[in-house]
Image (spheres, helix red, strand yellow):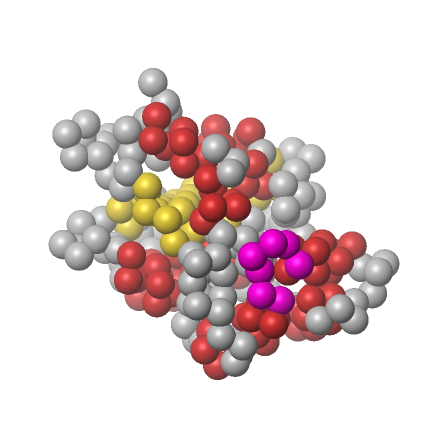
Amino acid sequence: MADEQNPIPVMCVHGWGGSFTTTWERSGFTALLADAGRPVIGVDLLGHGTAPKPHEPEAYADLTERVVAALPTDGSPIDAVGFSMGALTLLRTAVEHPTAFNRLVLAGIGRNVFERDDERTASIIKAVDGEGDPEDNVARLFGQYAMQAGNDSAALAAVLRQPQRIRLDEQVLSAVTCPVLVVVGDRDFVHPADRLVDALPNATGTVLRNVDHFATPEAFGFVDAALEFLDAIPT
């Protein structure tokens, strides 16, 4: 339980095409954390929000850099919440910095941690470049995200073109020993998350009924589960 005199900060990391503001502030999630007395650390990953937006894929080889830069300088562990690419980035950070986090909430990731789908990624990149198949609903939605106000579609395409430096498997994930909550919708293309939950030494899973990937961060089931797990129920 968090010390009322020294509450544990909560880092919030958005997914691809989002930002701290659009994913966590506009939904009211950060306001709920504030109501519970929890300081919030907002992170915009490279290529997103207020962060620089290079167009060279090689610039995105290590998305954990901005997460690591936002960690407390005194080394004290914090809680963190991530969605989709943000959840993957937090997981990679936890692998390399096992003492950085007190608790992790990872939403919108599951089998994609282990199963690389190059065909899907290629279709999404085409959609972002304006050349997608209009019948491919997932790719089309990613393309729409790329065109939202404040986004740089060339930077977002570059993120997708650069494979991440840290590959994740069961052996690597065994280093993440802090309590982890994995939340995924049953209509999410990354569902199920059983293998991920089993690979993490101290993880539990929550499945959201009738929730797809894009709806996850604002789903009531996600918000309730995350706040309860973080011991951050507003008073």
Give the quadrant of residue 138.
Answer: bottom right
Which residue sits at x=54%, y=77%?
55
Where residue 90 sits in the image (x, y, percent)?
Answer: 40, 56
Which residue sits at x=44%, y=68%?
52
Q: Is residue 182 visible?
A: no
Give the main secondary structure, helix, strand or loop, of the magenta stretch: loop
Q: Is residue 10 above or below residue 116?
A: above
Q: Quadrant of the N terminus?
A: top left
Magenta stretch encompasses residue 151: yes
Magenta stretch encompasses residue 150: yes
Q: Is residue 84 above or below residue 81?
A: below
Q: Between residues 188 and 21, which one lies in front from this camera angle?
A: 21
Q: Is residue 218 visible?
A: yes
Where residue 203 sits in the image (x, y, percent)?
Answer: 41, 45
Instruction: Please give the count of numbered marks on the rendered protein.
Output: 0
Q: Is residue 177 above or below residue 8?
A: below
Which residue sits at x=54%, y=41%?
217
Residue that sits furthest to the front in the current view = 149
Give the quadrant of residue 128.
Answer: bottom right
Q: Between residues 51 and 17, which one lies in front from this camera angle?
A: 51
Segment tinted magenta in the rendering: 147-153
Q: Quadrant of the C terminus?
A: top left
Residue that sits furthest to the right in the current view = 135
**Residue 119 as seen in the image, left or right of residue 182:** right
Which residue sits at x=32%, y=47%?
41
Where residue 181 sits in the image (x, y, percent)?
Answer: 43, 42
Where residue 163 sits in the image (x, y, percent)?
Answer: 52, 75
